[in-house]
Image (spheres, helix red, strand yellow):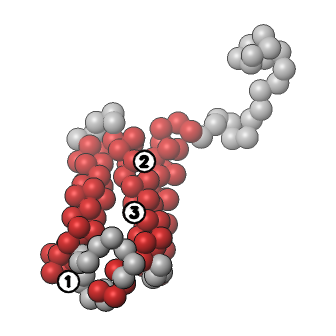
């Protein structure tokens, strides 16, 4: 992260042309505090077995995907590494949402009219 503050860690400064930033300091702070902080918070909650852990993982994955989306939209430059980071955020979010109970059991089951659990009964 220090490399981002000192000059972009090998990323050309020209990539910031057309963005609100003239250096990598603010993007580096956002990346470290918001994106990295949300990931760290999720890991700590998971390690402590807190009930909120899976929700924090879902939020951290969304933060990661939003970061990558905004980064690409602002810089208009794409790198395969951004695809990897977006994919990891997506996988993290999907797994967290499934762990929170979004997976129907049995999968693809349908409520039939007149079921006790349905709205018709």
Picture layout, residue 53 above or below residue 70: above
Tell me what residue is drawn at x 37 percent, y 52 percent: 60
| Horizontal side of residue 77 vs 29, given as left or right | right
Q: Give how far apart the Cα atoms at labels 3 and 2 are.
A: 14 Å
Query: Is any atom of residue 43 visible in this view?
Result: no
| Residue at the top extreme of this rendering | 121
Mark 1 sits on what residue?
Answer: 7
| Residue 54 rendering spot, x and y as whole percentages | 39, 42
Query: Which element carries disc 1, helix, strand or loop?
Result: helix
Is 78 situated above or below 113?
Answer: below
Mark earlier in primary sequence (1, 3): 1
Circle 2 crowding by C-alpha within 10 Å: few under 14, some 14–19, many from 20: many
Q: In which quarter of the image is the N terminus?
A: bottom left
Residue 93 marker: none
Q: Tell me whether circle 1 and circle 3 mark residues in contact (CB < 8 Å).
A: no
Q: Where is residue 82 in the image (x, y as percent from the top left)?
A: 44, 75
Task: Indicate left or right for 51 with 83 as reference.
Answer: left
Q: Mark 3 points at which residue?
A: 67
Q: In terms of sequence position, does the residue under pointer 2 or pointer 1 come before the other?
A: 1
Q: x%, y% of residue 85?
A: 42, 69
Disc 1 from disc 3: Cα separation: 19 Å
Q: Position of residue 39 (x, y in %)?
A: 30, 55
Q: Badge 1, how many Cα within 10 Å: few under 14, some, many 20+?
A: some
Label 3 SS = helix
SS at mark 2 in the image: helix
Left-right relation of 9 to 84: left
């Amino acid at each position: 992260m220090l490399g981002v503050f000192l000059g972009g860690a090998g990323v050309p400064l020209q990539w910031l042309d057309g963005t609100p930033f003239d250096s990598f300091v603010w993007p580096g702070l956002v990346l470290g505090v918001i994106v990295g902080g949300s990931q760290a918070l999720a890991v700590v909650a998971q390690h402590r077995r807190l009930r909120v852990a899976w929700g924090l993982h879902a939020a951290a994955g969304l933060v990661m995907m939003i970061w990558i989306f905004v980064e690409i939209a602002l810089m208009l430059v794409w790198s395969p590494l951004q695809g990897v980071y977006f994919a990891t955020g997506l996988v993290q979010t999907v797994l967290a949402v499934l762990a929170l109970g979004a997976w129907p059991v049995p999968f693809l089951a349908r409520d039939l009219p007149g079921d006790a659990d349905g709205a018709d009964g």
